[in-house]
Every structure is written in structure tokens, then in C-alpha cells.
């Protein structure tokens, strides 16, 4: 049986940070809907401009576009042993589509780790986030997880940048979308019995250890 994991949590909870760690530990691909959208927007296509019209305001991209993108990605050869989904699903419609897709593949979700964090800590983290220009999943924080050389990615030496949606007004909109559209997804998975809450206010390595233990336990269950 393949291992399908959905990482959930408010903006800034550490989904991208922890997904990279889990991918390195498990060998499963890290699939980030936000990262995929940023790559499409960088290509300067009609689709990129359409996505930017939502992304740049901090709004969710419509379900049909998002579901199609993730469905295609899940069909890729590197996804046959499972995946770590980060940022998808974010609406109940997306969660239902994912469930139907996995069912059609005779698969199911192993676990939905929920990285829980208070809003004020999320805001503090987003204000200090820096990402690598070449790979925005190389994520740093100016105080909590700084690069060895200020402004430079440790992994590939590229400059770091501030994501366009990390401006205060856009963060406010993203958190509002999270409260209205994504918190019902937490309840959806809680009822299905796959949600596991992890205290994401601990230091990064402590969160990683708790996450790995939860995933290992789910795989044995
Ligand atoms: P996306 O890219 O998914 O962003 P997000 O959900 O807003 O989440 P973030 O990337 O902001 O936070 P994170 O939890 O990954 O935190 P991180 O690890 O970086 O989505 C962007 C946009 O794309 C959306 O607004 C929407 O427009 C669109 N989109 C994406 N998916 C969609 C979908 N399914 N449907 C529709 N639209 C969609 O950590 C944050 C900071 O904290 C970093 O600086 C990090 O170093 C630091 N940090 C992490 N953990 C810790 C810790 N334990 N202690 C101290 N610091 C920490």
C-alpha cells in the first residue's frame, strides 16, 4: 500500500518546512500546490496570469484548476509509492475530490498531520520568512532558522527573497480564507479519523520528531 499524507495547518505553521524534512526521511515526493502555482506564474503564460489574479490578492485559486493540477501530479511516475501533500486540499470540495481519486486508485490517506499554531505566532513567522530564488521550498526564518550567510541559500547559494504574498494585507486575506474555507477540512478529516494534531509551536526539530513518530505509527496501524 502506498503512503498518502496530507499536511495541514495555518499559513506559517511550517507545512513547507516539515514536508521537506519528511520527504528527505521517507523518500516520498513533496507536492506543494502553492509551489506549483508559483512555478506556473513564473512561466508568464495565460494560465499563469489567471492564477496570479487570485494568488496576488491572497485568494484561493478556484477548485477546478487546483484539483486538475493535483490530479495530474498524482499520476506522475514518482508518486506511485505515495506523496506528501502540502497546501492541498484546502476546501471540502478539494478534499472530497482527493478522496474519490484515491478510492478510484484503491488507495487511501494514511494520516493527516495538523500542525497547530496560534495566529500571532503564524504572523511573526511569516514576517521573517525568506525563500530561495531557485527552489522556494528551501525555507528560512531571519531569527529562528537563519541561513549561514545572510540572504543566501545554504543549499544552492541562490539569493533569498520575500514571497509576494507575505505582505501584511495579503497575509490577512490568506488567514481569512484559511478560517472560512480550510478549517472545515480539518473537521472533515477529524470525522474520518485520520487527523493527528501536532503542536507546531515547538522548535523545528521537535516538530519534525513528533511528525515522524505520528507518520510511523500510522504506517504500522
Ligand atoms: P502556499 O504556498 O501553500 O502558502 P500557505 O498555505 O499560505 O502556507 P505557507 O507557505 O505560508 O506556510 P507554511 O505552513 O508552509 O510555513 P513555512 O514552512 O513556510 O499557498 C500560497 C497561495 O497559493 C494561496 O494563498 C493560494 O492563492 C494558492 N493555493 C495554494 N494551494 C491552494 C489550494 N489547494 N487551493 C486553492 N489555492 C491554493 O514556515 C513559515 C516560516 O516559519 C518560515 O520562515 C520557517 O522558517 C518558519 N518556521 C517553520 N517552522 C518553525 C518552527 N517550528 N519554529 C520557528 N519557526 C518556524
Image (spheres, helix red, strand yellow):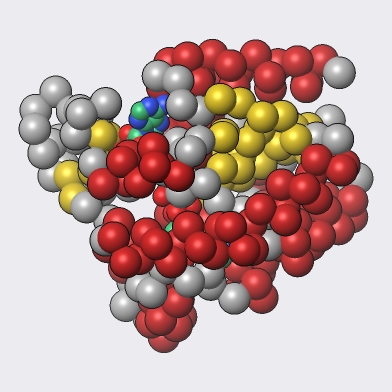
Residue 40 position, x and y percent, is 41, 68
In the image, is residue 115 above or below residue 93? Answer: above
- Is residue 220 shown above or below 143? above
Compared to residue 177, the image places residue 129 above or below, namely: above
Of the pair 9 and 94, the residue shown nearer to us: 9
Rendered location of residue 57, percent (x, y): 38, 74
- Say which of 28 and 62 sits in front: 62
| Residue at 71% over, 47% down | 186
Name the residue rendered at 14%, 23% in the picture: 148
Extreme-left residue of the structure: 150
At a point 13% along the width and 36% down the height, the residue shown is 152
Residue 85's image quarter?
top right
Q: Is 179 placed left or right of 43 in the picture?
A: right
Q: Is residue 104 left or right of residue 84?
A: right
Q: What residue is shown at x 32% (from left), y 39% (from top)?
A: 125
* Residue 1 visible: yes
Task: Estimate the x, y position of residue 1 in percent, counting from the top left.
Answer: 84, 30
Total numbered badges shown on the rendered structure: 0
Residue 165: which quarter of the image? bottom left
Could you tell me residue 73's position as x and y percent? Answer: 61, 56
Q: Quadrant of residue 62?
A: bottom right
Q: Is residue 31 visible?
A: no
In the figure, 130 relative to 147: above or below?
below
- Quadrant where the C terminus is found in the figure: top right
Amino acid at each position: 500500500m502506498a503512503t498518502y499524507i496530507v499536511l495541514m495547518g495555518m499559513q506559517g505553521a511550517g507545512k513547507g518546512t516539515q514536508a521537506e524534512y519528511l520527504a528527505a526521511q521517507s523518500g516520498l515526493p513533496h507536492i506543494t500546490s502553492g509551489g506549483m502555482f508559483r512555478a506556473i506564474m513564473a512561466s508568464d503564460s495565460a494560465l499563469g496570469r489567471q492564477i496570479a489574479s487570485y494568488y496576488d490578492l491572497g485568494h484561493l485559486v478556484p477548485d477546478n484548476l487546483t484539483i486538475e493540477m493535483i490530479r495530474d501530479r498524482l499520476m506522475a511516475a514518482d508518486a506511485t509509492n505515495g506523496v506528501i501533500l502540502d497546501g492541498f486540499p484546502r476546501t471540502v470540495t478539494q478534499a472530497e475530490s482527493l478522496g474519490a481519486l484515491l478510492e478510484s486508485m484503491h488507495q487511501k490517506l494514511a494520516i493527516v498531520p495538523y500542525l497547530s499554531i496560534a495566529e500571532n505566532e503564524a504572523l511573526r513567522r511569516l514576517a521573517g520568512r525568506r525563500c530561495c530564488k531557485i527552489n522556494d521550498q528551501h525555507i528560512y526564518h531571519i531569527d529562528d532558522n537563519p541561513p549561514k550567510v545572510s540572504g543566501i541559500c545554504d543549499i544552492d547559494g541562490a539569493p533569498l527573497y520575500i514571497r509576494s504574498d507575505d505582505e501584511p494585507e495579503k497575509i490577512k486575506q490568506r488567514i481569512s480564507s484559511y478560517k472560512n474555507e480550510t478549517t472545515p477540512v480539518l473537521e472533515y478529516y477529524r470525522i474520518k479519523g485520520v487527523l493527528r494534531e501536532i503542536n507546531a509551536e515547538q522548535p523545528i526539530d521537535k516538530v519534525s520528531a513528533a511528525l515522524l513518530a505520528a507518520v510511523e505509527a500510522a504506517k504500522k496501524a
